[in-house]
Image: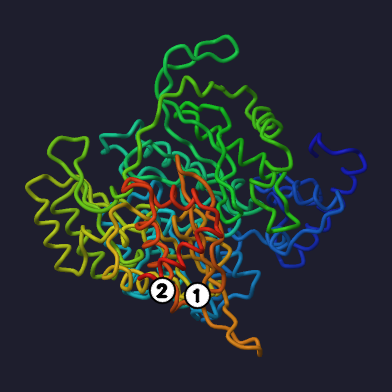
Amino acid sequence: MSNDFSPDQKRYLEGFMSGMQSARAARGLGPLGGAGEQGNATPSGPDREHAEAQAKTVAGGGKLVDQEKWKAAEHPFDAYARFKDQASSGTYPKPEDNFRWRYHGLFYVAPAQDSYMCRLRIPNGILKAWQFEGVADLAERLCGPYAHVTTRANLQVREISAQNAPLLLEGLADLGLTAKGSGADNIRNVTGSATAGIDPLELLDTRPHARAWHHHILNDRSLYGLPRKFNVAFDGASSIATLEDTNDIGFQAIEIGEGATFEGAAVGPGIWYRLALGGITGHHDLARDTGIVVAPSDTVAVSDAIVRVFVANGNRTNRNKARLKYVLDAWGFDKFLAAVEEKLGRRLIRVDASFVKPRPIYDRLAHIGVHKQLQPGLNWVGVALPVGKLTARQMRTIAAISQACGDGDIRLTVWQNLLISGVPDAKVDDVIANLLACGLSAETSVLRAGLIACTGATGCKFAAAHTKEDALAIAAHCEPRITLDQPVNIHLTGCHHSCAQHYIGDLGLIGAKVPVNEDGDTVPGYDLLVGGGYGVDGGMARPFREKVRAEEAPALVEAILRTWQVHRVSAEESFVAFARRHEIEALQVLVAQTGEAA
């Protein structure tokens, strides 16, 4: 038993583990840690760290939440045969199995849809054109004939029947893809710079580091079953923002100049990752700089140690407090990093910010249109997708374009669209023409380029509004009435899970039930916030107006954007700078006055 426990705690934990073993035996399951530990109440094997953390919580007087009990009673990876039995009978899961099947990437989304949704794992958001085409074939045969690009540079497919769910998972494996660990209490899809390896501005190609962490996770069962989900991102300081500061761990490529030292030894110079921790925008926090720099070759070891400290100390009694942010809030960064260093068995390198050179500035429109690559004569083409949706036919066309005119890579972005890379100058026009022929484009309005929306109530039981449809309604209303001369991000999310990250939008809308009478009847709508940002503009949006009916949101968005254009101090003042320059009450008055004048 761990040396962290007192003798009394050890006896208590042995009793706890014995009880867990009995509960598993009653379900016809083997003991924790494998068949070789019959009669041994001490946890071992790949689930040991999680079992010890659960037992320590109970020994300290805490009550495990249901999800922790479900994990202890039957690990989801031990239940695949049972999952297939359910599927063969057309049975959808009860809550405990709905949670378990999320370890396999499947989410039962009733009552929004009486079917599963499946979320994949695509490290750095890059897959091959033939894999993209294969996903289209699976979607058309086994799902709704479409896919969504997500805000983690990933793909989701929906409308999967119980019978088709195993066929989909096994079909993805046949394509060299997986959905393992893309849901529930696991490390989610690993994001990286969308233009990694092809961007003239980038400091570092993130692909090998995102891929190494991805495979490390896939091949270590002890990294599944965390207190809650966990996000890791690698940003190479390229043209397109990766939003690494919204992740639990954000690696930010930096260049260290001459003269930096740590504990008397020279550091650098060269390209390193800066380590930021604790991002979770749904809980009003961006990842904060730790002062630590990490060699690119060391990111897997450092990430692993951070995750294991979180596994041992994350909250397993309150799901709302079970993210890394809350360990950092309770401990402070110094104590947490000391625990990480103890786990690693060595010190982490710290460098004063004065030795860090300024990073390149993002191009907020680089994910749309034609852009020159690092490689002479080649381009990436950013394809505009209506709030991330693609039909199976469009996916096949994009795959064919990539193979015939590009380098065969499909690059998904956190902005819910994709890039076709490696396009020679002479083939750019062919790419544009073929996109238009399938109903897509490499061009869009400035407003639509920054329009982000989660699945919404059409496909998610948590959402209070139809976010994708309402996002398109906002664009349709605003575009004929106002022309934007600067990028603006408008994020619509359906619920407090904040999948569309509304707190970092210039304008953020979160679904709300809007009362319409004294009887308690409601209609879909939003609470609207203003002034969020990321990167150098990082900060949480502030509440502007609550309980706005969905049909009234487009006119309100127009009025806010028009107020910015009329009252900004210069044509160069961004929306976020304008919004933050005003107190909310003053901004509300300005919007009302501008709306009346219009």
Q: Secondary structure at mark 1?
A: loop
* Position of residue 562 measured from the top left corner of the image (x, y, whole percent): 36, 62
Q: Nearer the viewer, residue 216 or 369?
A: 369
Q: Nearer the viewer, residue 466 or 583?
A: 583
Residue type at mark 1: give it.
Ala
Residue extending farthest to the top is 264
Q: Neighbour class for label 2 at 10 Å: few (<14), some, many (≥20)?
A: some
Q: Nearer the viewer, residue 102 or 513?
A: 513
- Indicate which disc, 1 or 2, sits on the residue closer to the N terminus: 1
Residue 524, numbered label: none
The Cα–Cα distance between marks 1 and 2, rounded to whole angstroms, is 8 Å
Which residue position holds label 1?
465
**Quarter occupied by residue 597:** bottom left
Would residue 40 be visible to someone looking at this image?
no
Q: Are marks 1 and 2 in contact (CB under 8 Å)?
A: yes
Q: Image height check: is 110 above or below 273?
A: below
Q: Neighbour class for label 1 at 10 Å: few (<14), some, many (≥20)?
A: many
* Position of residue 367 measured from the top left corner of the image (x, y, whole percent): 29, 51
Which residue position holds label 2?
470
Residue type at mark 2: give it.
Asp
* Position of residue 311 measured from the top left corner of the image (x, y, whole percent): 67, 45
Q: Image height check: is 130 above or below 423?
A: below
Q: Look at 26% across and 49% down and name the residue there.
A: 409
Query: Taking 425 as reference, is 588 left or right?
Result: right
Q: Secondary structure at mark 2?
A: helix
